[in-house]
Amino acid sequence: MPTTTTLQHEPNGVLCFNTPIGSDQVIAFVSESSLRARYGGVPADEDDVESMYWLHEGEINAAVARRIRAGARQPVVLRASDL
């Protein structure tokens, strides 16, 4: 299976992405407001949700993995408290 992360920024401010968990690709969603609540902003020249995702990719993917281990089903929806 491919392990490349695919991002899709929806018009409503939600970021859809896939993340590898073992040999599976898990679909997950996180809102821009959840990312901003946890991480604040990014430098002014990169102030968008995709840049914020890439800056914190490891932590975000770890949050998805924690939710899956806790029994969440796909798609995983991350909240600020998950991050």
Image (cartoon, rainbow, N blue to C red):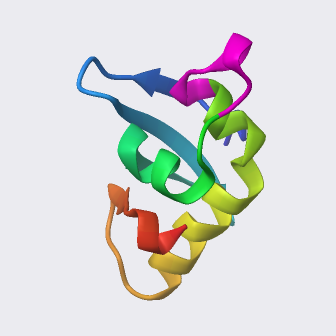
- Which residue is depicted at the point 41% across and 22% down? 9
Q: Where, by quadrant of the figure, is residue 15 drawn?
A: top left
Depth order, front residue of 8/43? 43
Look at the image and say whether residue 35 sits in the magenta stretch: no
List x then y, in percent, for residue 58.
76, 56
Whether residue 23 is visible, yes or no, is no
Q: Is residue 73 left or right of residue 53?
A: left
Image position of 7 with respect to 31: above or below: above
Outermost residue, top side: 45
- Which residue is depicted at the point 41% across and 36% down? 16
- Which residue is depicted at the point 44% across and 88% down? 70
Image position of 82 with respect to 24: above or below: below
Quadrant where the image shows the C terminus: bottom right
Look at the image and say whether residue 43 sits in the magenta stretch: yes
- Which residue is depicted at the point 43% across and 63% down? 80
State the count of labels: 0
Depth order, front residue of 58/73? 58
Residue range highlighted in magenta: 42-50
Quadrant where the image shows the N terminus: top right
